[in-house]
Image (cartoon, rainbow, N blue to C red):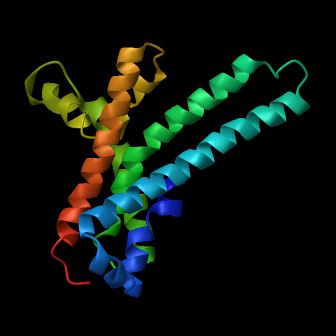
Amino acid sequence: MVVLVAGNRIAEEIGSGSVRYVIFRTSRASWSLGKFVGQTLMIGLALMLSGASAYAVAKFRLAGSGTPDLFLNMVQWSLRAWIYSIPYLGLAMGLSHLTRSSSKATVMGILAITLCFALSILIRHFTLDTGWRAYLPHLGQLLPDGHKMLLWRNAAAPLVAGSATLVTLGVCYLLTGYAFFRNRDV
């Protein structure tokens, strides 16, 4: 959902040339971060509304399932899903800085997210306790999948640490793409 909704927003404006008028008044960094924050909030709102809508359907269609605890849990898991989507959004929008074509940006985002999942599986599969393979889990910390289990916990410390790490990864992915866009002629 993240790639299809927001992965090509930057490439669309670069390709159409409308970015020239925006970056005339503001810096490229603030434009990129503004796009990222806006898309992040849009996806967060969509996920929160999805959780609330799922609760409403459960309340009206399933007898005895409309408790307030269920609503709080659905909103809580929607929030966790939103936080987990932030690094993938940063990755897709960072790659969107590299091209003028929105189609290419979408394809690059889909391939990058698929590669992240494949690398996570390979890292888990080939990790051993000795030798150079013992260091593979440290490489997994650069991928969002390496931090998703922290979002499953209900204790505050791992939840806050995982959330902060995932948001930081998203911003780092975005800024990596921005580094290529920074001096590019638009």
Query: Number of marks in the image?
Result: 0
Looking at the image, which is closer to me, 37 or 4? 37
**Looking at the image, residue 34 lies above or below residue 81:** below
Q: Quadrant of the C terminus?
A: bottom left
At 35% from the left and 53% from the top, the residue drawn is 90
At 30% from the left and 38% from the top, the residue drawn is 122
Residue projecting furthest to the bottom: 17
Residue projecting furthest to the left: 131
At 71% from the left and 26% from the top, the residue drawn is 71
At 29% from the left and 43% from the top, the residue drawn is 169
User: On the picture, is 131 further left or further right than 92?
Assistant: left
User: On the picture, is 146 further left or further right than 137?
Assistant: right
Whether residue 163 appears in this view of the structure is yes
Q: Position of residue 12 (x, y in %)?
A: 43, 77
Q: Quadrant of the N terminus?
A: bottom right
In which quarter of the view is residue 131 placed? top left
Residue projecting furthest to the front: 25
**Looking at the image, residue 114 lies above or below residue 70:** below
Q: Position of residue 176 (x, y in %)?
A: 21, 57
Q: Position of residue 70 (x, y in %)?
A: 72, 21
Whether residue 119 appears in this view of the structure is no
Residue projecting furthest to the top: 155
User: On the picture, is 106 further left or further right than 44?
Assistant: left
In which quarter of the view is residue 73 placed? top right
**Looking at the image, residue 92 lies above or below residue 128:** below
Q: Position of residue 56 (x, y in %)?
A: 80, 35
